Image (cartoon, rainbow, N blue to C red):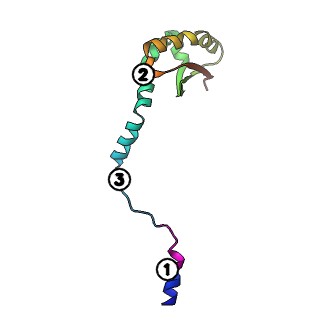
Amino acid sequence: MEEDDKLRGASSWQYQQKKTSSRLGQDIASYLTQRDRVFEKNAAIVDVWHEVVPAFMQAYCRLDKRIGNTLYIQVAPGPYMHQMQTQAGEILEKLKQVAPRCGIQKIRLIPMQ
């Protein structure tokens, strides 16, 4: 009996996990509703991408990511990077006009790999 008490005392401090269950669909729906505004902003940028970037540059650049109010664009190195640098301000203004809810304030160019 004394050994049983010692054994119970030794293991009583351990945290026992609560058995909870949730449906995967509910978890996904919750995640999507929390991230809804971010998805809308990103989708708006993708939708207007072909309108704001000149047709001859579309083959040499692509969207990379959006962090905060900054849009990162991958561009092929060399003359295409230079061309995009000269047009970045114009592209930003077009983006602000066509999709103002995106909130993009800066464009950063990174070399394409």
Question: How many residues crowd mark 3 within 10 Å: few (<14), some (14–19), many (20+)?
Answer: few
- In the image, residue 74 lies in the stretch drawn in magenta: no
**Residue 3 on image: x %, y %:** 52, 87
Q: Amino acid at mark 3?
A: Ser
Q: Which residues are magenta?
A: 8-15
Classify 11 as above or below 110. below
Q: CA distance from mark 1 to mark 2?
A: 60 Å
- In the image, residue 9 lies in the stretch drawn in magenta: yes
- N-terminal of the pair, mark 3 or mark 2, is 3
Residue assigned mark 3:
22
Nearer to the camera, 87 or 96: 96
Q: Amino acid at mark 2?
A: Ala
Question: How many residues crowd mark 1 within 10 Å: few (<14), some (14–19), many (20+)?
Answer: few
**Residue 72 on image: x %, y %:** 56, 24
Label 1 SS: helix
Residue assigned mark 1:
8
Q: Is 62 placed left or right of 30 in the picture?
A: right
